[in-house]
Image (cartoon, helix red, strand yellow):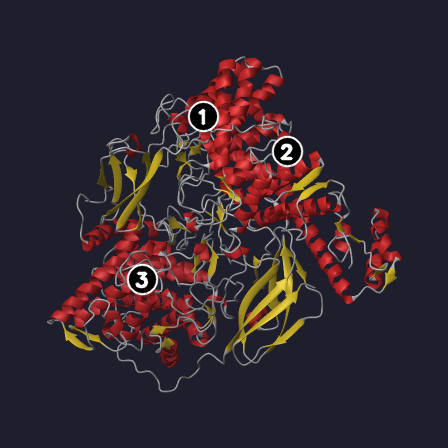
Amino acid sequence: MANFAIHCWRPSHGARSSIIAGIVLSSCVILVQFFFLDIVWSDLFDVLWAKLEVYKADGLGVWFYNLKRVQNSTPPKMRSIVLTALSFCAAVFAQSSAVDQYLSRQVPISKTSLLANIGPNGSRSHGALPGVVVASPSQVDPDYVYTWTRDAALVFKAIVEQYTRGEDNNLRSLIDAYVWSQTRLQQVSNPSGTVATGGLGEPKFNIDLTAYTGSWGRPQRDGPPLRATALVGYANHLIAQSNTSYVTSQIWPVVKLDLDYTAAYWNATGFDLWEEVSSSSFFTTSVQYRALVEGATLAAALGRADDAKVYRTEAAKVLCFLQTYWNANGGYVTANTGGGRSGKDANVALASIHSFDVAAGCDAKTFQPCSDKALSNLKVYVDSFRQIYSINNGIASNAAVATGRYPEDVYYNGNPWYLTTAAVAEQLYDALIVWDRQGSLEVTNISLAFFRQFSSSVSTGKYAKGSATYKSLTDSVRNFADGFIAVIAKYTPADGSLAEQYIRNTGAPISARHLTWSYASVLTAAAARSGYVPESWGAKGAVVPSVCERGGGGAIGNTVPVTFKVQASTAWGENIYLTGSLDALNAWSPENAILMSSASYPTWSVTVNLPANTQIEYKYIRKGNALCFCATVLAQSSVVDNYVATESPIAKAGLLANIGPSGSKASGAKSGIVIASPSNTNPNYLFTWTRDSALVFKTIVDQFTSGADTSLRTSIDQYLAAQTALQQVSNPSGTVSTGGLAEPKFNIDGTAFTGAWGRPQRDGPALRATALITYANWLIANSNTSFVTSKIWPVVKLDLDYVQNNWNQSTFDLWEEVQSSSFFTTAVQHRALREGAAFATAIGQTSSASGYTTQAANLLCFLQSYWNPTAGYITSNTGGGRSGKDANSALASIHTFDPAAGCDAATFQPCSDKALSSLKVYVDSFRSIYGVNSGIASNAAVATGRYPEDSYFGGNPWYLTTAAVAEQLYDALIVWKKQGNLSVTSTSLAFFRQFSSSVATGTYASSTSTFTTLTTAVQNFADGFLAINAKYTPSNGGLSEQYDRNTGSPTSAVDLTWSYAAALTAFSARKGVSPAGWGAAGLTVPTTCSGTPSGPSVAVTFNVVATTQFGENIFLTGSIDALKNWSPDNALALSAANYPTWSITVNLPANTNFEYKYIRKFNGAVTWESDPNNSKSTGSSGSLTINDTWR
């Protein structure tokens, strides 16, 4: 059997870049020592030797000396082993280099950004007093403009360490400001109490150092010990510098209060560091133990012997209790004693790194980073995320992955966090420091599974530093650690900003931006990677008492988690609270009553830890906002009435605020330009979309032409002028005459957006034409034809001509994801050409009208092909590989509503049997996938999103899609009431039987009880969707793009203009406002379709394995239109979700030969794959997968 060892040479930071570029194996130099009858595979090594000859001056040739001198007959099996070894080392060094590069760039960014969040001079800390750490400058979604005792202490511990190790002497004034701020903060009375009655356990404060009095998870008992630890580190440095007087006068009073609190309350329950579970928590217990131990040492140094004795006594009890968290059967630390979760939690890794004491070695009692228990736990924790995040798909079971707080997390849909992923890396780097210092590494039965990730044959035992096993394992652990930093690097935006989380499916940053703790975590992980050894705090030689004693604030386990549940229907803006006779129930205080969760509405619930063996009294109370008259349960219609009344002016104001030049949130937008949202990060929607703008201005035009607001005319004329100019802007889709009208979005200054995007999108020209035709028809009716012919017709004609000539070409859908034919696009194109023909005729443009009429008929014919009669719904796209259940169809129905057409099924009018059947299928597809829909009856309204397979921002409900369902139903009611009857067909029967199980097919006159029953039920059903939006609309009425699928919290882009427009049009439909007809009545579908999209397409998936550096991306281009005709500027961006495999799926024409290449883009530079071009052919149908490796 062959015996071999692999040694991967790591180039120093100063190694020549030519080495990295020149060696085929990405700077991987391998010494493979074979002892197999003295035989090696010398033909391979001859090649490698030849390549290395160039680099003899760098001292690398010696590494291959033994490979050059041996014979040339290694068996094929051994060749495979060697190639595997070569590939492994190549990956190691590619990753190591990427991490080096990332940290060299990210560390200064992180430090600058961290300091920017500290008052009073930080650029993002406006309003913060000196030394106050702002958790994040994010004010909404979520609001983190507060200072947390825990976060601030961890941040200043990182700052203190930089100062005390001499890296930045300028930090001292900032640390002194922190001492000042915490001295003041400790004295602030707050909902947890005063400084003498438990107030030190208050988790967060306003940044002006006043108390935060809202509902929160309090107390949190980790803040005082963490603050003590940060300040003890500073005090020890000052004592060593002979500045004891400052320590005794300024620092000790703060530290003593925190240590006294910790000694008194360590065994009382508190909320964990995630502020969700009230119990005992490993992280809290661990940092409490450290604080008491090092606090005792400081007290003794200052002559405070009595204090030191108390702290040591309580520390021993804490250490004893710390052992109880270990789950020997599961091989991990159970992070909390309560909460009902698995206990696998970043809590433990964070505790390990923040209790690291190099002098303690691999001590398991204090769960040091390299201890067998800490390593076993780390493996269990990391593995718990391998299957639940899409961005971890395809990653080897022993490689680094993105990690979050705990696997059951649902906050912001439960995503990876930058700081938790960094914590894993930091624990591993800390372990490496200890192994290196002590000169050995030990594998025990407990840690065996951890080490066998890297060497399946390793056995228990101690391995000395010079052994091959030691080197193999430590190299693997370092590579593993670097892998977690590489994950963070992959999902760090180009500007280096670090949010709280990154999305589990896409890796895009989400939740609070510029999170101070995220920046601190990168700094401490980078320091650990560089080998920084923090000062010892006294963990060495700790002895666990044989009997655990209770102490301080009460007995361990002396509380009972009590879950309160109450059934209560509420009005919009109203919430249910709990209060009662105990302190834990806030002593009958309505102001401080405990907010209950409505996640399972109408059941409200909350879990509170109450003292054991205690009688309690309690009551529920209702609280409403100023917009609500909420003393009793209100009928749903009253809730919606109230919501419509209050939200209408807010939505209108929100919409107008996003229109340039005068909109309050439209800074930088040209006159008449609609910004999609003022959100410029996470996501950046500070652009103008042709589609969104047209839908917004159709709403504005309808309000103006109906007489609801005659002041809007100026805005409409500004929109017309803006679109006149925008049509002429050359862009990646072409010029005005070569396809540029289908460019989906532009910069808000009216210039072209030239980045990669899903283009073309062919709904924009049609929708813009419809908005302007509606305005033109009003002007003609008011004798202003000259303005129409000179100003409006030229714009409309360009759009209609484009639609006429391009309707049967593939397009990206309205969600900008699927390129095929799309029902929404086809429907609005049909409407635009139909009403465009009538408009052209009215102003004497009969030749244009003829062409529009002809193509409108072809479009109507093609429109029928989307109907899926077997499943009873509209298949929204002809490609994309999804189910086809999509809000696309409901949006098409409401935006092509023509009351004169009645319930016409050919144009899929809102009350048509096909549109109603499709609506039911679409709505039902969301009932079981969103947490906010749990427990809702199967015939009641629910939150709806774009399509059930959606993963954007975690795949959430959207305000505009939920409103669209309501609007379609209101439109249907308008027609039924107007025509005086309602028809139930076999197609729509399932829809109506939601409300009356006995209803049969037939036509029911308005005088019948069936008509009344069904229309009343549909009205209530429609109101239910608005009630859903009302429930998840913030108290200020602001409408984002989405609301979280589990919590209902707004997410994604704030103040989405389309959301406001959707609310306004739904409210209008609810009032019974009928739009003008557009010519849908009496249409006949041609018996033969002409001009329909040419031929089938094949979904081609391109996969390429390509290693990239931080900030570099892979694109695709090729020889046909769908591959952007060899244009590097318009090349298609591939996804790195399964890095190092980059992927994209493109619909290409069937039976077509094509050539293609991959290109790299980095900092503006473009690198093409080497020649020759790749070539393939598509079949007649189906799909094709192409697997490549970068050349």
Q: Secondary structure at mark 1?
A: helix
| Screen quadrant of the C terminus | bottom right
Cα distance between the residues tagged 1 and 3? 55 Å
Q: Nearer the viewer, mark 1 or mark 3?
A: 1
- Depth check, mark 2 against mark 3: the one in front is 2
Kind of element beneath mark 2 = loop
**Which tag is nearer the camera, tag 1 or tag 2?**
2
Question: Which label is found at residue 964?
Answer: 3
Residues under labels 2 and 3: Cα distance? Answer: 62 Å
**Front residue of 302 and 530:** 302
Which disc is residue 361 wearing? 2
- Say if 1132 sits above or below 230 in the image: below
Q: Secondary structure at mark 3?
A: helix
Q: Position of residue 374 (x, y in %)?
A: 57, 40
Residue drawn at 61 percent across, 42 percent down = 428
- The answer to whether 26 appears left or right of 237 in the picture is right
Q: Position of residue 538 (x, y in %)?
A: 58, 26
Res. 36 in view: yes
The residue type indicated by label 2 comes to: Gly
Amino acid identity at mark 3: Ala
Q: Earlier in the sequence, mark 2 or mark 3?
A: 2
Q: Of the residues under marks 1 and 2, which one precedes in the sequence? A: 1
